[in-house]
Amino acid sequence: MVARMIQAPSTTRTRLGDHIQQLAAFAPTAFPVLSLYLDLVPHQHDHARDAAFVRAALADRLSTLHPHAPERESLERDAIRIDAWLRDQLPPSACGLAIFACSGDGFFDAVQLESPLERRALYVGSVQIRNRATLAGNVCNASPAADTAPALLVYDAEVVAVGPGGRRRIGLADFFVRSGVTTLAPDELVESIELPVPAGARGSVHLRRTRRRGHDLASVTLACAVSPDGVTRIAYGSVGPRPVLLADTSGLLADSRVPDADKAARLSQLFGDASPSPTSMRASPEYRLAMLRVLGLRGVASAIERLAAAS
Ligand SMILES: Cc1cc2nc3c(=O)[nH]c(=O)nc-3n(C[C@H](O)[C@H](O)[C@H](O)COP(=O)(O)OP(=O)(O)OC[C@H]3O[C@@H](n4cnc5c(N)ncnc54)[C@H](O)[C@@H]3O)c2cc1C
């Protein structure tokens, strides 16, 4: 979804297409070829746990091979190399890792995935929710606090819906109506959620306020993306009946020379229609509106920094 390739320390290849080409060019071999995917929580890696998972995943396969067979030795060398790689080279920010290995044929490729959002801070509920829930479910649930919504909105996500009448695409900004209600017809299902590849670089960030860190629905959630043409896209959630996407095309927010006071005034203007529920138990309307402006200003500053770093 909001994933891009980052440069692996062990390779100069950075694009997914290059990794795929290399895999496609790998000739059939008598040695076992290992493909392993690790779902990781950024900055919460646990080498002992990951190593145990790899050992357990390989145990069954190893038990089918003769102790001194070259195939088994190849697989054992793979296990050692993967263990060392996870310990020494896995960047803390990685949120997913695919490893392809075949020591018998001298092949090893690690494809790291990380979110383009700052500090990979796209938190969605607890670990259980992250592991079990689907992106389509999060979006169709249409909670104003849906954590994936702001990031999807600033990246112009489109919902692909299918039903008896065929297939149609709905821009995510036109999808949410209010809590629990979308523009999906009763007989339609979401088939996929697509993110167009941005035309150029974008600096982006996702920020979230909760009562309890990491295990709570957001009191305010905001994503911001700045592009080199001076357009700033801001999406927020939890401050009204549905997630909202806004754009500043004046160039003011994206300009690092403009003082914060002027940006704060522009943000207040943009957030003019934000209407937090007065009855929510999570935060008062005043708090949400104040935090929306704070996160807006922080989001713009971080997105500008990230765009500069990427350029
Ligand atoms: C304890 C708890 C904590 C939570 N914390 C968070 C949180 O911190 N942040 C957050 O954003 N959300 C949170 N949620 C909400 C939860 O993340 C979302 O409900 C979840 O993402 C839904 O995903 P799911 O795949 O389980 O969908 P389901 O719960 O199975 O479905 C949700 C709704 O979407 C519909 N639906 C699902 N898939 C499709 C489809 N393909 N096409 C059409 N309709 C579909 C279902 O019919 C249903 O109405 C929490 C929920 C619980 C129970």
Image (cartoon, rainbow, N blue to C red):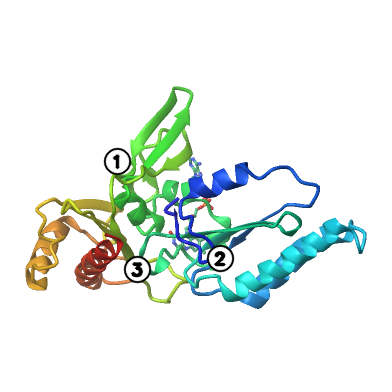
Give the percent coordinates (x, y) of residue 47.
63, 75
Where the C terminus falls, by quadrant?
A: bottom left
Q: In which quarter of the image is residue 283?
A: bottom left
Front-most of 245 and 113? 113
Q: Check if mark 3's residue and mark 2's residue have beta carbons within 8 Å.
A: no
Amino acid type, mark 3? Arg
Q: How crowded is mark 2: few (under 14 residues within 10 Å), some or many (20 or more)?
A: some
Q: Which residue is drawn at 79% across and 60% down?
A: 74
Q: Name the residue under label 1.
A: 174
Q: Mark 1: which amino acid?
A: Asp
Question: Residue 209: where, in percent of width, then height?
Answer: 34, 71
Q: What's the residue at 62%, 42% (across, down)?
A: 25
Marks 1 and 2: CB-CB under 8 Å?
A: no
In this picture, is 15 found above or below 283? Answer: above
Q: In this view, does 179 lie to the left or right of 129?
A: left
Task: Pick the residue in front: 93 or 21.
Answer: 21
Residue 36 percent coordinates (x, y): 66, 57
Q: Name the residue under label 2.
A: 40
> Regarding mark 1 in the picture, which secondary structure is present there?
helix
Within 10 Å of disc 1 (Cα), the crowding (few <14, some 14-19, many 20+) is: few
Callout 2: helix, strand or loop?
loop
- Judged by depth in the image, the label closer to the viewer, 3 or 2, is 2
Is residue 196 visible in this depiction of the protein? yes
Q: Tell which tag, 1 or 2, sits nearer the viewer.
A: 2
Label 1 vs 2, first from the N-terminus? 2
Mark 3–mark 1 contact, CB under 8 Å?
Answer: no
Disc with the residue nearer the chain's start (3 vs 1): 1
| Residue 265 rendering spot, x and y as whole percentages | 8, 66
